[in-house]
Image: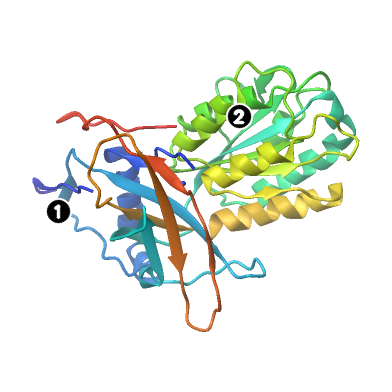
Amino acid sequence: MAARSLSVQSRSGARELIYVLPFFLSLLLITLASPARAQESSSSPAYPDDYTISINVNVVVLRATVQTRDNGLVSGLSQDAFQIYEDGVLQQIKYFSHDDVPVTAGLVVDNSGSMRPKRADVIAAALAFVRSSNPQDEVFVVNFNERVLFGLPDRMPFTDSIDRLEVALSRVAADGQTALYDAIAAGLDRLKQGSNAKKVLIVISDGGDTASKHSLAQIMSMAGQSNAIIYTIGIFDAQDEDRNPRVLKQLASKTGGEAFLPDSLKDVTPICEQIAHDIRNQYTLAYAPSDKSRDGAYRTIRVKASGSGRGHLLVRTRTGYFAPTTAPSSPKTKAIQP
């Protein structure tokens, strides 16, 4: 590879601003590894093989789901169909793709006492998610009541095995109180170890918390600074005093995911299948902010999409990020991770 260099200057409360290499390189690898598919799904040219990326890469990376008014997923859009606005200012899209890429995914499952009669349905739904996902996904399980436990053995942080995940989901008896915030913190931390650039948490809980060391404000901040998408599924009865659907909605909205509040347990499995389908049909967009100020200010993001004959389209993604306050190090590279 030649020694030429490419320096690119470049949703709620996300430090989705990636200062350097690892994430952006993974996007390039996706493009270069699948040239035929990239030509079909993207109007952006692949970067030439004889280029390397050096040091100062300031890029905001967004995962976007496009839907019709009746919640149907929209695929096949080109880069020209999208507009990104930061604080109301139109931005230039630097990277675009619509490929089904492997993800690192965490299943965060409530095993408190109130979930005991629902466990069989929850496990079946979680496994339905895995079966509907990309076969190359790497998945882990976080079981929690008042304690937080990873379902897989210590030597195995991730797996793609349905059988191992079923065992992992079944390791904890449903009992005790609820440390939801601690479990989400553990899930976000484990995502950092994943090898895939795209990261997802699926949280199945009633949204209540009675035993965490972390506060809700801390978890919202962590979620906002993470590049993870969080989907939440609220399972609770009307008599459940600990239920908190508002928290589940906030977590999903902040990260570009979606909150589901099913009326019946029988709806949980199709919801998990829907989430897997959603993840596999997202668009990846990246832009270099026109505002280069390193002032730590919050910047709002709005993404619009249009398609001939498709009617009004809705775009779900992160809603903003905090600008950095310090310059990226040079020549040593560093990435901000969740």
Q: Which residue is mark 2?
A: 184
Q: Residue furthest left?
A: 3
- Give the answer, above or below, for where 142 lies relative to 61: above
User: At label 2, which amino acid type do we have?
Assistant: Ile
Residue drawn at x 32%, y 70% is: 43
- Can residue 137 be seen in the rendering of this structure? no
Query: Decide: marks 1, 2 in contact (CB < 8 A)?
Result: no
- 302 sits to left or right of 218: left
Please state the horizontal and vertical placement of residue 298, each as a whole percent of the image. 39, 40
- Colour scheme of the picture: rainbow
- 308 sits to left or right of 262: left
- Can residue 143 be seen in the rendering of this structure? yes
In three-dimensional space, the C-alpha distance between marks 1 and 2, rounded to whole angstroms, equals: 41 Å
Residue drawn at x 44%, y 57% is: 302
Please state the horizontal and vertical placement of residue 195, each as a whole percent of the image. 43, 37
* Disc 2: CA contacts within 10 A as few (<14), some (14-19) or many (>=20): many
User: At label 1, which amino acid type do we have?
Assistant: Asp
- 126 sits to left or right of 297: right
Please state the horizontal and vertical placement of residue 93, each as a whole percent of the image. 31, 60
Q: Nearer the viewer, residue 317 or 169?
A: 317
- Give the answer, above or below, for where 14 lies relative to 208: below
Q: Which residue is mark 1?
A: 50
Residue drawn at x 53%, y 49% is: 256
